[in-house]
Image (tube, rainbow, N blue to C red):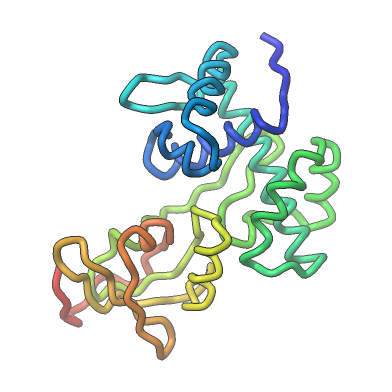
Amino acid sequence: MSVEITSTKEEYLETIYRLQRKSGVARTSEIVDALKVAPGTVTNTVERLEKEGLVTHEPYKGVKLTGEGLKLAQMTIRRHRLAERLLTDIIGVGWAEAHSHACRLEHGICDDIADRLEEILYHPASCPHGNPIPSKSGKIKMEETMPLSEASAGETLEVVMIIEENSEILQYLASKGFTPGVKLTVVERAPFEGPLTVGVDVHVHAVARNVASIVWVRRKEPPGNKGGST
């Protein structure tokens, strides 16, 4: 089936990709929140995407990409993350602002330009926020990571990526020093879904579980006997 690709369709596929990666499925309410559109608009668009064979939708469960939908989503993600690299590495746009600018740029970049952009940027493996850039063939190099929210008290970790690239959240995380490559230690986990107390350099921050869930990390050291409740 020949599928016409529009900027709206790309935005939906990209959004579903991000939500599906985070929790295994994209719920229509989450798509509404992410795209800031009316529920009826999301319902109608998802129905069109399903008719075109790009997604599957199970009522009360959510939306998932098909193989073809995943391929198109990865092409959009590739252009987006290369655009972010262009903005930060070459133009000098701030780390937190690059995502929103790249959202507009990605729709004007064809595959040939994306290939040339990748060469100019010396084949970056990830975007400025640490998320992997799909190759031209759609392959993604994934590391063994986990959400900070799942870490135990006493663990020493390294931030790998921020999976939700909202400008306000990125600004907040940057202000606390939570950027890719930074090492941190979980000092304490408050009970009853309370915040994590996290040490970064000489600073200690209380981080809400929902925020910690979008900061993905790799283990540097196993949990020690530094105390802290679980």
**Quarter of the rendering occupied by the C terminus:** bottom left
- Residue 115 on image: x %, y %: 81, 42
Q: Residue at x 61, y 33 (%)?
A: 73
Image-based side of 118 in relation to 149, left or right: right
Q: How many marks?
A: 0
- The answer to which quarter of the image holds residue 215 is bottom left
Residue 149 vs residue 191: left or right? right
Outermost residue toward the bottom? 202
Instruction: Spot the residue most to the top.
Output: 1
- Locate residue 26, reporting x and y percent: 43, 34
Asked whether residue 67 appears in the rendered view, the answer is no
Seen from the viewer's position, the closer of residues 119 and 166 is 166
In the displayed structure, 97 sits above or below 184; it is above
Q: Residue at x 43, y 86 (%)?
A: 201
Percent from the top left, x then y, of residue 98?
Answer: 68, 60
Above or below for 64 versus 201: above
Give the side of residue 228 with respect to residue 93, left or right: left
The one of 140 and 51 positioned closer to us in this rendering = 51
Q: Is residue 70 visible?
A: yes
Q: Residue at point 56% right, 29% down? A: 70
Percent position (x, y) of residue 74? 62, 36
Question: Which quadrant holds residue 200?
Answer: bottom left
Location of the N terminus by quadrant is top right
Does residue 89 lie above or below 115 as drawn? below
